[in-house]
Image (tube, rainbow, N blue to C red):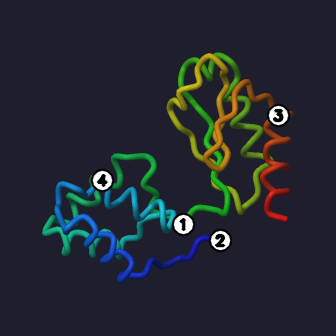
């Protein structure tokens, strides 16, 4: 499971890599999520101070972009496309199925386009995009994901 706290020294190091430039906020947030999986309230406060921005400015950016989580994710992240092409091919039903079968170590996230419309419905499992995902194929992908942990 992802740790519930993020080391402030690690955040300061990331900010330093971007010379504490406020216009690099999105890139700094991306790096924090890449390394830690999420952005805590303490990190928002720290970034506001180090970048000379208001907490509202930082919080607004975090809330605007869907990849910036404010809660620690599970060990695995599964994204199911909810765009029109995927909905037409069954992503709503797939999402209902996923809500029933994923465990607490898996974060299930709706997304609005994985760029795989020709192979709808599309799913991303731990960064790997799958197309034409049925409930059976979804279950197989989960089993493979869990098997990779062993």
Q: Earlier in the sequence, mark 1 or mark 4?
A: 4
Residue 103's spot in the image, x, y percent? Answer: 76, 57
Judging from the image, what secondary structure is the residue with disc 4 in? helix
The residue pinned by badge 4 equals: 26
Residue 137 is tagged as 3
Q: CA distance from mark 4 to mark 3?
A: 35 Å
Work out whether 117 lies above or below 45: above
Residue 82 sits in quarter:
top right
Residue 88 as seen in the image, left or right of residue 49: right
Judging from the image, what secondary structure is the residue with disc 1 in? loop
Q: CA distance from mark 3 to mark 1?
A: 27 Å
The quadrant of the picture occupied by the N terminus is: bottom right
Judging from the image, what secondary structure is the residue with disc 2 in? loop
Q: CA distance from mark 2 to mark 4?
A: 25 Å
Which callout, 3 or 1, points to the residue nearer the camera?
Answer: 3
Residue 1 is tagged as 2
The crowd level at tag 3 (other Cα within 10 Å; few <14, some 14-19, many 20+) is few
Q: Earlier in the sequence, mark 3 or mark 1?
A: 1
Q: CA distance from mark 1 to mark 2?
A: 8 Å
Give the residue at the far left of this rendering: 52
> Residue at horizontal 81%, vertical 33%?
135
**Closest to the observer, 17 or 36:** 17
**Closest to the observer, 43 or 126:** 126
> Residue at horizontal 36%, vertical 83%?
9
Q: CA distance from mark 1 to mark 4?
A: 19 Å
Work out whether 15 lies above or below 25: below
Q: Earlier in the sequence, mark 2 or mark 4?
A: 2
Work out whether 94 lies above or below 19: above
Residue 72 is tagged as 1
The crowd level at tag 1 (other Cα within 10 Å; few <14, some 14-19, many 20+) is some
Labels 1 and 2 touching (C-beta < 8 A): yes
């Amino acid at each position: 499971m992802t740790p519930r706290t993020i080391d402030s020294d690690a955040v300061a190091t990331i900010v330093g890599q971007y010379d504490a430039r406020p216009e690099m906020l999105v890139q700094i947030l991306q790096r924090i999520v890449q390394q830690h999986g999420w952005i805590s309230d303490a990190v928002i406060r720290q970034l506001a101070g180090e970048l000379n921005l208001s907490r509202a400015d930082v919080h607004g950016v975090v809330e605007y972009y869907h990849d910036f989580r404010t809660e620690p994710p599970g060990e695995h992240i599964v994204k199911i496309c909810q765009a029109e092409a995927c909905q037409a091919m069954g992503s709503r039903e797939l999402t209902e199925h996923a809500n029933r079968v994923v465990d607490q170590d898996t974060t299930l996230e709706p997304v609005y386009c994985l760029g795989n419309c020709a192979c709808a419905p599309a799913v991303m499992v731990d960064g790997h995009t799958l197309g034409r995902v049925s409930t059976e194929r979804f279950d197989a992908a989960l089993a493979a994901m869990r098997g990779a942990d062993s």
